[in-house]
């Protein structure tokens, strides 16, 4: 017998088996803890994905509704434009001449900007104000850099439905009524 064998007490097979079982149980417990942590992480990530999905769906639905509102206004403006050309201003809307005067009184109408932005207006033979009153407003053209016709119509769809050019209405009534610009 060697010296190392003489000093090491003999381990019984039952003790060896018990030690192995303890090690395996400890390893199993550690693996269970890791697995529980991963399940918790997966649950958290799943919740985050569901939140993102709901947010994305909500944002997409809002965008679709905004597009529908704008589209409805565009169709209304198309009808208003043709009716205005065929029959003159709608009931309750001032004459073209008076509308042109109202634009002349508004700081938001910029004739130079309008001509530079829409070069086809020069070819129409109409003044910038007349063009805006007769068709430009209904086409969603802006009368100057500080007024967005389509935004005004979308925020106030009743104005489109009654046949008013956006800035003419805003200058005549909308500003004092506190109508939103967008």
Image (spheres, grey):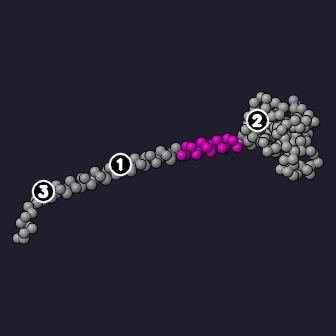
Name the spot of residue 171 as percent of width and height, x first: 83, 34
Residue numbers of the magenta segment: 52-67
Pointer 1 residue: 36
Task: Name the quadrant containing residue 177.
Answer: top right
Which of disc 3 and disc 1 is earlier in sequence? 3
Q: Which numbered tag is attached to residue 88?
A: none
Marks 3 and 2, Cα distance to the nearest angstrom?
Answer: 88 Å
From this viewpoint, is residue 79 visible?
no
Chief SS of the magenta region = helix
> Is residue 20 shown left or right of residue 81?
left
Name the spot of residue 27 as percent of width and height, x first: 27, 55
Task: Name the quadrant containing residue 24.
Answer: bottom left
Which quadrant does the C terminus fall into? top right
Which quadrant does the N terminus fall into? bottom left
Pointer 2 residue: 157
- Element under disc 2: helix
Marks 1 and 3, Cα distance to the nearest angstrom?
Answer: 32 Å
- Element under disc 1: helix
Which of disc 2 and disc 3 is earlier in sequence? 3
Pointer 3 residue: 14
Marks 1 and 2, Cα distance to the nearest angstrom?
Answer: 56 Å
**Does 87 appear above or below 114?**
above
**In-front residue for pair 125/135:** 125
């Amino acid at each position: 017998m060697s010296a190392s064998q003489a000093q090491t007490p003999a381990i019984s097979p039952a003790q060896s088996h018990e030690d192995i079982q303890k090690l395996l149980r400890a390893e199993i417990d550690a693996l269970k803890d890791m697995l529980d942590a991963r399940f918790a992480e997966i649950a958290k990530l799943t919740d985050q994905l569901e939140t993102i999905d709901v947010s994305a769906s909500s944002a997409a639905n809002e965008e679709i509704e905004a597009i529908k509102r704008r589209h409805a206004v565009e169709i209304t403006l198309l009808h208003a434009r043709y009716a205005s050309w065929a029959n003159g201003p709608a009931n309750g809307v001032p004459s073209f001449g008076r509308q042109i005067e109202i634009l002349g009184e508004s700081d938001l109408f910029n004739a130079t900007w309008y001509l530079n932005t829409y070069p086809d207006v020069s070819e129409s033979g109409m003044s910038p104000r007349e063009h805006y009153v007769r068709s430009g407003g209904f086409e969603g053209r802006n009368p100057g850099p500080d007024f967005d016709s389509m935004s005004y119509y979308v925020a106030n769809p009743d104005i489109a439905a009654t046949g008013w050019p956006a800035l003419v209405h805003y200058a005549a009534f909308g500003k004092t009524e506190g109508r939103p610009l967008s």
